[in-house]
Image (cartoon, grey):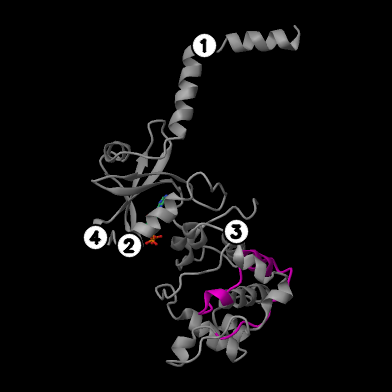
Amino acid sequence: MPRAILNVVQLRSIDASTVESFLQGLAKERQVRFTAQELCSFTNNYSKVLGSGGFGIVYEGEFPDAVKIAVKVLKRSTLDERAKTQFMAEVSTIGRTNHINLVRLYGFCYDRLMISLVYEYMENGSLDRYLFSDDPQGIDWNKLPQIALGTARVGRRRNARVGSTDSLDWFPKFVWDEYEKDKLATMTLSHGIEENDREKVQRMAMVALWCVQDSPEARPPMSSVVKMLEGGVEIMPPPKPFHYLFSIGGNVPNPRTCNTIDNSIGYGSNSYKEPTTPIMSKYEIEIASLL
Ligand SMILES: Nc1ncnc2c1ncn2[C@@H]1O[C@H](COP(=O)(O)OP(=O)(O)OP(=O)(O)O)[C@@H](O)[C@H]1O
């Protein structure tokens, strides 16, 4: 039978209800705004808690087509400017991000009763569970650089939570102290890191010290972080971070006079000035590359 006729026969065998349900499925896929009632039904009245974070509680749920979801209900008490900004930043990524290393945001609810974010469900929970676990079966030193690299690849901007100290935890300061004393190698040794992983660990520590510079301007863009983590470029010695910790009132290093990592890894000052909207310039997450 000629191919064209075969196609017609095959098309005819698909009945109208199949097409209708296919179209309804598509329409559903595009729904990004949900009502509080819909979320209540998807989560079976918020019956299963997956965990909680700084902004609220995360519940397990399921769309009517059985796709599993995680619904983060933002706490009313934390709905200050910071939470609202985070909400808008997250919502602004809908439809713009599709990356293997990013949890997909399916949609949101924003109404009188609640503000929530609806995410793709992660079967294995969150990364921090593995990063901070003492389980020897956890992540090894081969996997960790891959995770760091994957994370760096999805971002374009610098690590720029200016003024935020919640993630410093003083381990970075300890790492700096060791680095300054030229004792990074000893530090890796004392932490039981095996010989063949030490170079990787030291490289990651150097990149991390660049990423936690006081001044956002002094931090490398993610494209450079990727190159440094990949090992294709020499990592210049990072300037001293956390100046405010070392000397109250001390001078924050001037990024323009800091050690010019720019030249060594080939990014110029132009990349700092891309035109974006204010919300994007602060929060944009872009597909830097697909693995
Ligand atoms: N998409 C998801 N799939 C499965 N579990 C999730 C998902 N998102 C969050 N969780 C679970 O809920 C917990 C809390 O997540 P949440 O994002 O609120 O915390 P967080 O990472 O501390 O973030 P925040 O910076 O908002 O406080 C996670 O540790 C994880 O166990």
The residue closer to the viewer here, 242 or 193, is: 242
**Which residue corresponds to mark 1?**
15
Q: Nearer the viewer, residue 258 or 174?
A: 258
Residue 225 located within the stretch drawn in magenta? yes
Count of numbered circles on the image: 4
Q: Which residue is mark 4?
A: 77
Mark on residue 150? Answer: 3
Rounded to the nearest angstrom, the CA distance separating label 4 from label 2 is 11 Å
Point out the stretch of residues depicted in magenta: 213-240
Per the image, label 4 sits on a secondary structure element best described as: helix
> How busy is the neighbourhood of tag 3: few (under 14 within 10 Å), some, or many (20 plus)?
many
Disc 2: which residue: 81
Q: Are the residues flagged by discs 1 and 3 in contact, CB closer than 8 Å?
A: no
- Answer whether residue 290 is visible to the viewer in this image: yes
x 52%, y 69%: residue: 159
Residue drawn at (72%, 72%) of the image: 265
Q: Quadrant of residue 188?
A: bottom right
CA gap, disc 1 and disc 3: 44 Å
